[in-house]
């Protein structure tokens, strides 16, 4: 029970007092951490961001219902998750003020040496003052900092080691709060989005109005022979763009994976690529130019006028295998085709692999010809003013962990009493911030060194 | 010799050194014959060195950072587990635990070999210097956690051994109303310190029932008596976690820095990074529990066992069952 802490709270209503005591309790904090961990794991096991129907397809109905109702399909943005993180932060902060600060910086106090779990008594020849001076020199020469106190008429010497490291916990907890505040900065004033740009087209970042024109996109693929067959390993994705930033000057730049570009603080990333397709449509041999003007992207549909039919551009096939006449897994373009689905009244009636330039007869005088492909590049953009805070918090967290785990603050309580025969008994007791076990062997080494010192008896 | 052949030879050398070393050190664990310890320890060092040479040979041959697939990463995991263990074993004289570490490392290494796809250039997102920093850090943290896991198991074995002998003793003394008085287990915990040489085997100071059973000639108790005291085992678990947690933290941070460069956000809630976060939370919780007297020891050891299972889930479970940005599958 921490008396200094409870005294501070005397003036508060009891429920607040109880609340603070609960939140400051380490076991309660650990329970919250465990809750946070469990929610985090649920998000790993339950695939995130799918539509509700797909959960009903892969789980028994009651579980699927629970997943959807409890927002486990988007758990990291759910009330539960945010609340668990919020409670962890609240508990951590409360514990820092009520427990860590008062307990980690303890005053120099008298102790009953024999009652301390780590203690030893040695006899040293000499009078009280000289023995005390020798003992203090012994510890000071080993890097211990000596403090003397007169407590109720008894002279005490205290030897401290790594006292500064008592702030390790504070550093850790502060670091976590800094990281949390960095993420809040993003929620409050950052943004992100995706955009796909066809070769030759220009897109605008809506939030900062910068312009990006795709001059060209290329990809590099290497066929690799592995034990399980040929694998087409992507090696590079390169977008050549011209950007117009706030300064109004068109600037050519290159965007590659792992090499985003900076658009007035918003970073633009290479994310994906794909193929747009232009089609020629004709009816009774006459070209219908109004239908052929649009460039379709994978998944787009084209309605055939005056019929219930539509044609869906499903997928671009860069290379058709000459032997099997099936799509080859080789993503390099050499013999391109498209996969088209034909729908009638919304019902799929067939799927065809149509080589570029070959007309597809739809009946009733209509035909569709895939004419030419246009490559597009998919970009991700993000403005995150919280990054410097998160980075600073992360570095501080590491520093804090190293302090907490590798510099153990310990205190020796030393009391010298004169005994008979012109000798003194020296009582030693050790305390650390992490209990006694962890210091036991070092304490024993210290005591043996002291016993081996000149003029000291067992 | 052709470099790829060298690669294969080193791998076989490492695997056999671990396998034989594991047997030797388990035999040492049971018999305490010094020559078995020396033999097993040498094999651990040889196997570990062969592993690092193997990774180096692979890099020299292919000029591809060898850790970017499950084969390479499992291989480094085995090597780092053994390396970290060797450090502990030298410092705290813990070779008796080496058999378990070597056996687990050998299993992971052999499993990693089944994922060997041959030489494969890195996909664009993996072509980053962050990858070269991130993967070794994370995998080393797993190695440290493996060591803490083995110490936790040894703690639990000794703990439940003590419990077993304590309850048996209570039963016997109730039946015969005789026999030496043994303090109840929980009381014994607080009575174990002292700097005076009182003739008590330090490894048995906090396990009085075991100490009594040893003096009565029980073989099992004699064998448990060769393990360090419960308090020391608990501290060993704590020290191994103290290596693992900062490494994992640094691993998550470098992963975030890499994601910031490659994917447009330092945190994406990708299954892999999320699973690593869950393990990180569990080990942070372990550290807090370890500051409580009532939790130190048995409960903390169980916690560390569960936390290590979460590491295995994060490492292999996520790669194998759950697809995401980090999945190694082609
Ligand atoms: C649930 C909220 C939390 C509470 C209630 C809490 C409370 C505490 C308390 C009271 C201590 C001092 C223990 C003692 O020496 O008696 C401590 C230590 C510590 N805390 Fe927290 N904390 C929380 C969250 C965190 C988080 C998220 C981290 C991030 C890593 C963290 C890092 C640490 C570290 C490294 C120590 C030192 C442990 C050691 O010395 O072994 N804490 N915490």
Image: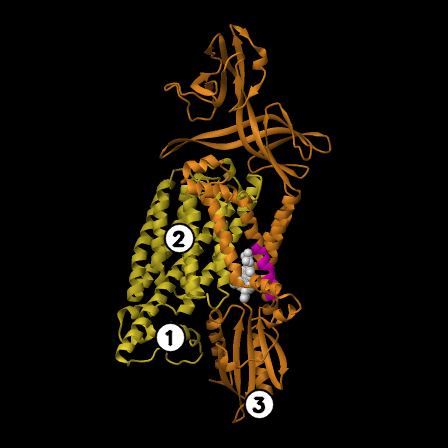
Chain colours: A orange, B yellow
Question: Does the magenta stretch mainly form a helix, a strand or a loop?
Answer: helix
Residue at (50% x, 44% y) in the render: A70
Q: Are marks 1 and 2 on the same chain?
A: yes
Label 2 residue SS: helix
Q: Nearer the viewer, residue B63 or B262?
A: B262
- In the image: residue A420, left or right of residue B99: right
Give how far across and how far down residue B87 sits, in percent: 43, 60
- In the image: residue A209, left or right of residue A79: right
The residue stretch that appears in magenta: A87-98
Give how far across and how far down residue B287 sits, in percent: 50, 61
Q: Residue A95 in magenta? A: yes
Q: How far is the residue under mark 1 from the one under mark 3?
A: 44 Å
Give how far across and how far down residue B182 sits, in percent: 35, 77
Q: How far is the residue under mark 2 from the one under mark 3?
A: 58 Å
Q: Are marks 1 and 3 in contact (CB under 8 Å)?
A: no
Within-10-Å neighbours for mark 2: few <14, some 14–19, many 20+: some
Labelled disc at residue B49 = 2
Within-10-Å neighbours for mark 3: few <14, some 14–19, many 20+: some
Mark 1 CB near ligand 1 (8 Å cut): no
Q: Hey, which quadrant is residue A58 in on the image?
A: top left
Q: Which residue is mark 3?
A: A127
Q: How far is the residue under mark 1 from the one under mark 2?
A: 47 Å
Q: Which residue is mark 1?
A: B184
- Label 1 vs label 3, nearer the camera: 1
Label 1 residue SS: loop
Q: Nearer the viewer, residue A383 or B255?
A: A383
Residue at (45% x, 35% y) in the render: A54
Q: Are marks 2 and 3 on the same chain?
A: no
- Furthest residue in direction bottom, as rendered: A421
- In the image: residue B138, left or right of residue A325: right
Label 3 residue SS: loop
């Amino acid at each position: 029970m921490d008396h200094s802490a409870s005294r501070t709270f005397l003036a508060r209503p009891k429920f607040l007092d109880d609340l603070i005591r609960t939140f400051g309790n380490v076991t309660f904090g650990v329970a919250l951490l465990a809750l946070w961990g469990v929610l985090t794991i649920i998000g790993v096991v339950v695939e995130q961001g799918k539509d509700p129907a797909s959960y009903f397809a892969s789980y028994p109905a009651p579980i699927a219902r629970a997943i959807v109702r409890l927002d486990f399909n988007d758990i990291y943005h759910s009330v539960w998750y945010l609340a668990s993180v919020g409670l962890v932060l609240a508990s951590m902060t409360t514990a820092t003020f009520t427990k860590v600060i008062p307990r980690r910086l303890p005053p120099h106090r008298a102790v009953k040496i024999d009652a301390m779990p780590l203690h030893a008594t040695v006899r040293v020849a000499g009078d009280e003052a000289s023995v005390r001076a020798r003992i203090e020199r012994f510890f000071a020469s080993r890097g211990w900092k000596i403090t003397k106190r007169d407590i109720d008429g008894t002279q005490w010497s205290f030897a401290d080691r790594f006292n500064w490291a008592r702030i390790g916990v504070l550093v850790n907890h502060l670091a976590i709060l800094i990281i949390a505040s960095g993420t809040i900065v993003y929620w409050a004033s950052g943004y992100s989005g995706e955009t796909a740009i066809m070769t030759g087209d220009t897109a605008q970042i809506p939030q900062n109005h910068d312009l990006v024109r795709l001059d060209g996109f290329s990809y590099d693929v290497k066929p690799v022979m592995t034990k399980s067959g040929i694998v087409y390993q992507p090696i590079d994705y390169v977008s050549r763009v011209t950007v117009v930033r706030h300064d109004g000057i068109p600037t050519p730049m290159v965007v590659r994976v792992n090499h985003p570009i900076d658009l007035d603080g918003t970073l633009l990333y290479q994310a994906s690529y794909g193929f747009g397709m232009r089609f020629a449509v004709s009816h009774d041999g006459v070209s219908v130019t109004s239908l052929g003007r649009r460039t379709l992207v994978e998944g787009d549909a084209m309605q055939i006028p005056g019929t219930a039919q539509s044609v869906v551009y499903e997928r671009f096939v860069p290379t058709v295998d000459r032997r099997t006449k099936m799509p080859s897994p080789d993503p390099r373009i050499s013999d391109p085709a498209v996969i088209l689905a034909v729908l009638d009244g919304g019902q799929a009636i067939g799927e065809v692999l149509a080589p570029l330039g070959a007309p597809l007869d739809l009946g009733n005088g209509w035909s569709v010809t895939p004419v030419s492909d246009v490559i597009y590049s998919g970009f991700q953009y993000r403005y995150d003013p919280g990054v410097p805070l998160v980075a600073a918090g992360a570095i501080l967290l590491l520093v804090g962990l190293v302090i907490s785990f590798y510099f153990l603050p310990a205190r020796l309580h030393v009391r010298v009493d004169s005994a008979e025969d012109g000798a003194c008994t020296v009582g030693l007791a050790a305390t650390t911030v992490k209990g006694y076990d962890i210091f036991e062997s070092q304490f024993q080494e210290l005591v043996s060194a002291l016993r081996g010192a000149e003029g000291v008896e067992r | 010799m052709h470099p790829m052949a060298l690669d294969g030879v080193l791998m076989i050398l490492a695997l056999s050194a671990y396998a034989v070393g594991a047997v030797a050190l388990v035999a040492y664990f049971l018999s305490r014959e010094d020559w078995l310890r020396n033999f097993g320890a040498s094999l651990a060092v040889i196997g570990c060195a062969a592993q690092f040479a193997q990774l180096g040979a692979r890099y020299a041959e292919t000029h591809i950072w060898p850790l970017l697939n499950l084969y390479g990463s499992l291989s480094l995991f085995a090597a780092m587990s053994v390396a970290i263990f060797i450090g502990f074993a030298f410092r705290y004289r813990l070779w008796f635990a080496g058999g378990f570490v070597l056996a687990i490392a050998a299993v992971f290494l052999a499993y990693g070999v089944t994922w060997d796809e041959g030489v494969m250039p890195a996909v664009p997102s993996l072509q980053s210097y962050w990858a070269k920093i991130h993967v070794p850090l994370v995998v080393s943290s797993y190695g440290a956690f493996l060591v803490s896991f083995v110490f936790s198991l040894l703690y639990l074995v000794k703990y439940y051994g003590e419990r077993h002998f304590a309850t048996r003793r209570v039963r016997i003394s109730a039946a015969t109303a005789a026999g030496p008085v043994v303090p109840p287990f929980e009381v014994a915990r607080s009575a174990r310190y002292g700097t005076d040489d009182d003739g008590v085997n330090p490894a048995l100071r906090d396990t009085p029932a075991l100490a009594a059973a040893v003096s009565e000639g029980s073989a099992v108790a004699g064998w448990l008596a060769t393990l360090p005291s419960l308090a020391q085992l608990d501290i060993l678990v704590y020290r191994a976690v103290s290596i693992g947690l900062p490494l994992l933290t640094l691993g998550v941070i470098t992963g975030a820095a890499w994601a910031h460069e490659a994917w447009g956000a330092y945190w994406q809630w990708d299954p892999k990074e999320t699973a690593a976060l869950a393990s990180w939370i569990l080990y942070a919780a372990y550290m807090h529990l370890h500051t409580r007297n009532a939790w130190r020891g048995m409960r903390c050891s169980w916690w560390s066992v569960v936390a290590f299972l979460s590491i295995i889930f994060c490492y292999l479970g996520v790669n194998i069952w759950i697809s995401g940005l980090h999945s190694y599958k082609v």
